[in-house]
Image (cartoon, rainbow, N blue to C red):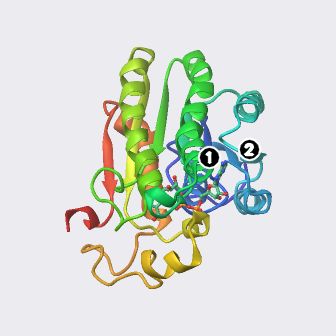
Amino acid sequence: MTGTNQTVQRFSGKTAIVTGAGSGIGKATAIQLAREGAKVALFDLNDQRIAETENEINQIFQGVSRAFDVDVSDEARVAKAIKEAAAYFGGVDILFANAGINGAWGPIEDMRLEDWEQTLRINLNGTFLSVKHTIPYMKKKGAGSIIITSSINGLDRFAGWGASAYSTTKAGQVAFAKMAALELAKFKIRVNVISPGAIATNVDESTKISDELKEIVIPVEYPEGSQPLADGPGQPEDVAELVCFLASDASKHITGARVRIDGAEALL
Ligand code: NAD
């Protein structure tokens, strides 16, 4: 590995898989993990964005990241990519199951089943499949840390209205993580969930909503005061710091926990 990296190498010798690493929270986390010594397998279905993340990391830390073209809702591709990543980097120690979409947005009575199902497929099946196919590699290592990106939506608050599919998936991820934490504790595999409030990313591009509803439901400007602790939405780098804490041995006694990271948005 080359580069002028002065940061503490908390993840030296470790391999991480980051899903949704082409943009936003996943990208910032992949960069932070690499900065702290991890080798990082970057999973995303957006070829261009994932290549950009790979180049950005490899320009500073040569050879520590590799992009994998993966749709997390496709079991065969998830299983194949995890197998390849484990073979390439020498196992898997950390999984950040983060890929997700806003998906179908609107009144329940108008929502098409296929749009509802697409949101569930990516956010819920994608989480399940990423975790399922990582477990054998973590068992082989005798330890592991899994972090899942949920949201404050679905548990703490409900994003105005129209987010029934999204909120269902985000609440479901928390139940899944707690069950997984219980099931996997005996293998020293920890599973924790993060619940971000609004974070400045490209996630709004993934909202499936009619033009007329868009004007009403999604604010163009981020409303002032929505996060009492901040001047605007949180930054992906803020979330990356939390993920790295949960991925590291500093959190070795924490599993089945859910941590909000929202500048107090959910308390309003
Ligand atoms: P983003 O759109 O910037 O990044 C998400 C990435 O996931 C994109 O690169 C996208 O291509 C990828 N992706 C989407 N579907 C995929 C699939 N099927 N397979 C593989 N990759 C896929 O958004 P973000 O805000 O960084 O989102 C990351 C996670 O954070 C999501 O789970 C999202 O629900 C959650 N979240 C975001 C916010 C926010 O305000 N940004 C708040 C709460 C939770």
Does dot 1 land on a helix, a strand or a loop? Answer: strand
Label 1 CB less than 8 angstroms from ligand 1: yes
Task: Locate the C terminus by quadrant.
Answer: bottom left
Residue that mark 1 sits on? 19
Using the image as rendered, state which of residue 80 and residue 140 is in the foreground. Answer: 80
Q: Is 256 placed left or right of 202 in the picture?
A: left
Q: How many C-alpha atoms fall within 10 Å of the one at disc 2: few (<14), some, or many (≥20)?
A: many
Residue 18 in the image: x percent, y percent?
61, 45
Residue 45 in the image: x percent, y percent?
73, 52
Q: Tell me, for residue 37, which label it has, or none.
A: none
Q: Amino acid at mark 1?
A: Thr
Q: Disc 1 and disc 2: Cα gap in Å?
A: 9 Å
Residue that mark 2 sits on? 70
Residue 225 in the image: x percent, y percent?
27, 80
Proximity of marks 1 and 2: CB atoms separated by less than 8 Å? yes
Please report the residue visible at 50 percent of the width from the left and 62 percent of the height from the top.
105
Please report the residue visible at 42 percent of the width from the left and 29 percent of the height from the top.
190
* Sequence-first tag of 1 and 2: 1
Using the image as rendered, state which of residue 12 and residue 238 is in the foreground. Answer: 238
Residue 103 in the image: x percent, y percent?
56, 58
Q: Is 150 placed left or right of 132 in the picture?
A: left
Label 2 CB less than 8 angstroms from ligand 1: yes
> Seen from this angle, which residue lies furthest left?
268
Does dot 2 land on a helix, a strand or a loop? Answer: loop
Q: Is residue 263 above or below residue 43?
A: below
Q: Is residue 14 above or below residue 188?
A: below
Using the image as rendered, state which of residue 182 and residue 112 is in the foreground. Answer: 112
